[in-house]
Amino acid sequence: ENVFLQTKPLSLDTMDKPYFSQINIDERRLRLLESRMTDNSSDSLDNSLSNHADHMDTTSNSSFTSTTPSSDRRKKRNFTPQEDSLIIEGYHKFTDDWDKILEYTKLERTTKQIKSRFTRLKKTRLLDLEPPPPPKRQKTTDNSSIGTLETEEQQKNELQHAQNLLKKKDQEISELLLQNKQQKEKITMLERKAAQQQEQLERQAEEPENQSDACIHDHIQKLVTKKAESEYKLRRLQVWENSSRLGKLVSKPRGHSLVEDWEDGFAFQELEIKRKQVATKKEKLENKRKELTRMKNSLKGKITTSSVPIDQSLNQEYDQLLLSEEVLKHQIIILKREDNELNQQLQHLLIERNYHRKQYKLVHDQEKSQFNTHPLLNHRYILENLLGCGGFSEVYAAYDLLEHRTVACKIHQLNSSWSKQKKDNYQKHALREHLIQKSIICNRVVRLFDVFELDNTSFCTILEYCNDGDLDSRLKERNKLPEKETRCIIAQILEGLLHLNKIENPIIHYDLKPGNILFHNGEVKITDFGLSKIVENSDDGMVELTSQGAGTYGYLPPECSGYSKSMISSKVWFYLFVVVVLIL
């Protein structure tokens, strides 16, 4: 026990190092602690004497109380380093809640003892976890140190210069990425708005029926109009972005007037330059190969026909020609491979251009249309955006306020300069299409829901909306369809044609082609019955062909190609069907 009365100053050598390792204090902090404890050795000595006195009092009191072995076991135990570590850890978790600290440490101590021990630990500054100040760098005056400092300074300058260059490059890249991001954000924002408005429209359609119909229709009309405007802006933005790359319509002088002609974008121009370069290289290599072949054959003739001993140089020259020829062949193969890759890129660009031209034409035609303000037709149908434009008709996507569904609105317009006979003939075909499609109820035929007049020169038919385009566009986009998909399409077309042939009064479609085969959610729908015929009360199933010269050339059967009146039967669909199958 006299160890507490020693006045030897504390140091790292005299400390219990395992004890300090238990409380996770590194060597630098131990050295800082040593310096503090050395400066305050007298304070530490007083604290040690105080602790020793407390310990002596407790020991003496306990010795007076009893001298039995049981009383010796009740003597006060000193705190171990492990217990100190647990107390410090518990304090970091629960601060001054000594009951929780006791429960956490599971020590056979009282809260008062733990609190007293923590106070002593705190007085000895063992909990001061502040990092020591960085050691001061000693000044050196020798030449080697000065050289080292200069080298370090030079390296720092070079590093700083490189970092500045990298920052400049990063800034340029960031600006380009920012511009691209802004464009994408615009497109995403428009798409999000369109989706939100579509969701609002669908939610509005499911509202309770106790609200006023007029108020609901007015609100739906506003939402549909906003949605259509957002979709049109998005389509126009995409067309504008792709115009420089894929092409656009430009006005070119032709004679004494200006005509609109399509001009390909820079993607086609760059690809054409690459193809020309490859073709030029290939032509040069072919010429070299032919020249080498001629020289090789000439040299081979000299070697084979010579009766005198052959000079060794001729054999070496011949071998060199063979090697050069093989190198040229390999280079030609590489150029052919590169040419094939360029052709594949061209095919992809052509597919993109076809879609881009279609969208470009839709935007251009909708801007010129008199129905581009999304009017309400027949107090029921709200026009959205243009789906297609023909010679004398326009097809718009429209929203039905009564049935709450999207439909196709086909607007037929009569030219005021037409003769009365031509107007009557056009109206007759439109009325025939209306009567035929309205009478057909088949999953493979586009249904007709309604027809009404707009004014003296135009009327409108409401058809089933198909959201996946037509077969003609799909063939142009993909060139060739997989066999499984082709079989599925053919089977559905055949099902629709068989239905038209088996009804009471069979119907001859007469204008079956890929452009009149639509897709809706993966299913095939046959449309455009304007040139169709109804076979009524005929013993032989024949009907007179009155629309001579009408239809689409290349898909018509031979009996429809003349100028005199012909008799056709419902079997004409078989010829049209075979033509479509051959295209697939």
Image (cartoon, rainbow, N blue to C red):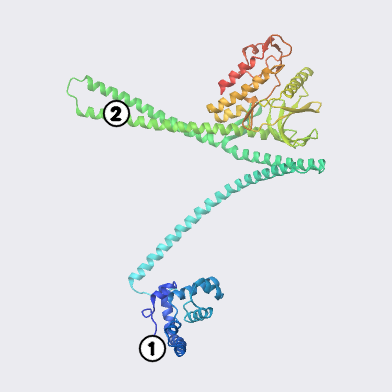
What residue is shown at x 62% (from left), y 21% (from top)?
Answer: 494
Q: Is residue 252 above or below residue 38?
A: above
Whether residue 183 sits left or right of residue 11 in the image: it is: right
Whether residue 108 sits left or right of residue 142 in the image: it is: right
Q: Nearer the viewer, residue 325 or 556?
A: 556
Q: Nearer the viewer, residue 213 or 334?
A: 213
- Disc number for residue 525: none
SS type, badge 2: helix
Residue 312 image point, x, y percent: 20, 28
Image quarter where the C terminus lies is top right
Residue to which mark 1 is pinned: 2
Residue 508 in view in this figure: no
| Neighbour tally class for label 1: few under 14, some 14-19, many 20 plus, Cα within 10 Å | few
Q: Amino acid at mark 2?
A: Leu
Residue 459 image point, x, y percent: 78, 27
SS type, badge 1: helix
Q: Nearer the viewer, residue 379 or 148?
A: 379
| Neighbour tally class for label 2: few under 14, some 14-19, many 20 plus, Cα within 10 Å | some
Image quarter where the N terminus lies is bottom left
What residue is shown at x 48% (from left), y 76% (from top)?
Answer: 108
Residue 497 image point, x, y percent: 65, 20
Q: Quadrant of residue 33?
A: bottom left
Q: Quadrant of residue 253?
A: top right
- Disc number for residue 322: 2
Q: Amino acid at mark 1?
A: Asn
Report how far apart the C-alphas of labels 1 and 2 lie in the structure. Answer: 105 Å
